[in-house]
Amino acid sequence: MNRSLLIGLLAVVVVAGGVFVALRPFLPKPVPKAAPPPTAAELKDPGSDVVARAMAGVPRDDAGAAVDSSAIKSRWLDDLHGMDLTALTASQREIFLRFANSEYCTCGCGYTLAGCRNSDMSCEISGPRLDALMDSVRTGKIRSAKGVRTRPSGG
């Protein structure tokens, strides 16, 4: 009878464990505790905190509020880091810049190709796309930017 009792208890434990494993996806998950916002001192000297360093670099208006990131990510850029535009004629350069400032990078950054290149020269998407665009404009495969974003007035 002891052996039967032991097997019965073992069976109950195995069944209970199976029920727990089966119901585990439906059990409530613990809510992680939110980190406190960085202090003014941390923003001035963020140290090694990546998020604080990134937030410290966000442009702010006169009231101290962060500037709309979509305006930053889609701003017009005439110079692209690491790209030699001197090989292009003036009209080719304008065509190149119109495409570079209107096409968005697909790496997930939300920047135009020009903006992505200037914010992250190691991007594996914007670099090759801009190189291909440069080659297409330089060789005459792209001769017009009709219908593409124009240079903002005053720029």
Image (tube, rainbow, N blue to C red):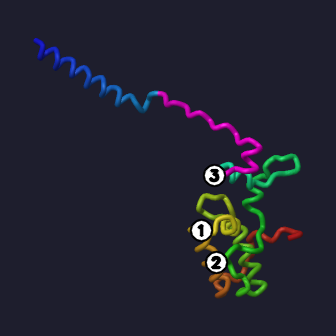
First of labels 2, 1 by sequence position: 1
Please give the residue where the numbered disc 2 appears in the rendered image: 133
Along the viewing direction, whichever of 57 and 41 lies nearer the viewer:
41
Please give the residue where the numbered disc 1 appears in the rendered image: 122
**Position of residue 77 measured from the top left corner of the image (x, y, whole percent):** 76, 70
* Res. 48 mark: 3
Cα gap from disc 3 to disc 2, whole angstroms:
37 Å
Q: Is residue 42 covered in magenta?
A: yes
Magenta stretch? 28-49
Looking at the rendered image, the disc whose residue lies closer to the viewer, 3 or 1, is 3
The kind of residue on which mark 3 rests is: Ser
Q: Is residue 43 covered in magenta?
A: yes
**Position of residue 80 measured from the top left corner of the image (x, y, whole percent):** 71, 73
First of labels 3, 1 by sequence position: 3
Along the viewing direction, whichever of 136 and 79 lies nearer the viewer:
79
The kind of residue on which mark 1 rests is: Ser
Cα gap from disc 3 to disc 1, whole angstroms:
21 Å
Check the picture and name the quadrant holding the N terminus.
top left
**Position of residue 70 measured from the top left corner of the image (x, y, whole percent):** 74, 55
User: Which residue is depicted at the point 77% across and 43% down?
Assistant: 40
Along the viewing direction, whichever of 35 and 91 lies nearer the viewer:
35
User: Which residue is depicted at the point 67% across and 51% down?
Assistant: 47
Cα gap from disc 2 to disc 1, whole angstroms:
17 Å
**Position of residue 108 measured from the top left corner of the image (x, y, whole percent):** 60, 58
First of labels 3, 2 by sequence position: 3
The crowd level at tag 2 (other Cα within 10 Å; few <14, some 14-19, many 20+) is some
User: Which residue is depicted at the point 62% across and 78% down?
Assistant: 131
Check the picture and name the quadrant holding the C terminus.
bottom right
